[in-house]
Amino acid sequence: MPTTGSIEEQRRDACATRETILKVARRRFSSCGYADVTLRDIAADADVSAALVVKYFGSKEDLFAQASGFEHDAERLLDCELPNLGEHLVRTLLDYHERTQGDPLVRAVFTSSRPAGGRFRDNFESQLVTRLADRLDGPRARLRAELVCSHLMGLGAARLVLRTQAISAEPTEELVALTAPLIQRWIDGPL
């Protein structure tokens, strides 16, 4: 009788499968919109059965709620003391680009304008922009937080969507050196 692996291996496989489904769902919802995506589409892209998607996430609405969340990405992006946050934000985002060929901030731009994108927009606002603004001292903290996020969105769009020539060719360390001080000025304030 063949063994199916240890319980620990099964858990790792289940976690990896769940993450694959979530990644596919984010990509599908971002590019197609909520109404045009089916659980079968996501299952086919993830190379799993639709029943497995339902097992892990329940309904399409529940999957969308998890795919539209920024909590994990916001934790990674904001996990730094304020004096070094500009560099950390740029470096973390560029690392995300390299590892996943995606960007959670660019995903927010594409998804928020689609049907059912309001939840995505609300999550982005509460989990990233508001949390950043709450950490900033001085006047116009909300505006400064939005400027930081908009600059990071632009960087991601230039690299991953538009694939602009100079930014795409620039080494990571150079992009960090050029971009982080500007972002840090908004973090430190005032405008």
Image (cartoon, grey):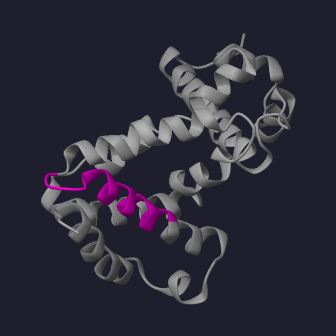
Q: Residue 73: image x %, image y %? A: 43, 44
Residue 142 lies within the magenta run: yes
Which sits in the foreground, 95 or 69? 69
- Splitting the image into 4 quarters, where does residue 74 fall? top left
Which sits in the foreground, 175 or 46? 175
Relative to 76, say whether 150 is above or below.
below
Q: Which residue is drawn at 32% across and 83% down?
A: 178
Q: Which residue is drawn at 39% across and 56% down?
A: 146
- 42 left or right, relative to 78: right
Q: Residue 76: image x %, image y %? A: 35, 46
Magenta segment range?
Answer: 137-153
Q: Furthest residue to the front?
A: 139
- Splitting the image into 4 quarters, where does residue 18 fall? top right
Relative to 3, say whether 97 is above or below.
below
- 60 left or right, relative to 158: right
Dividing the image into 4 quarters, which one contains the N terminus? top right
- Splitting the image into 4 quarters, where does residue 25 fall? top right
Q: Residue 26: image x %, image y %? A: 65, 42
Which sits in the foreground, 176 or 6? 176
Q: Residue at x 78, y 30 (%)?
A: 48
Is residue 19 something one can see in this rendering?
A: no
Q: Residue 86: image x %, image y %? A: 26, 64
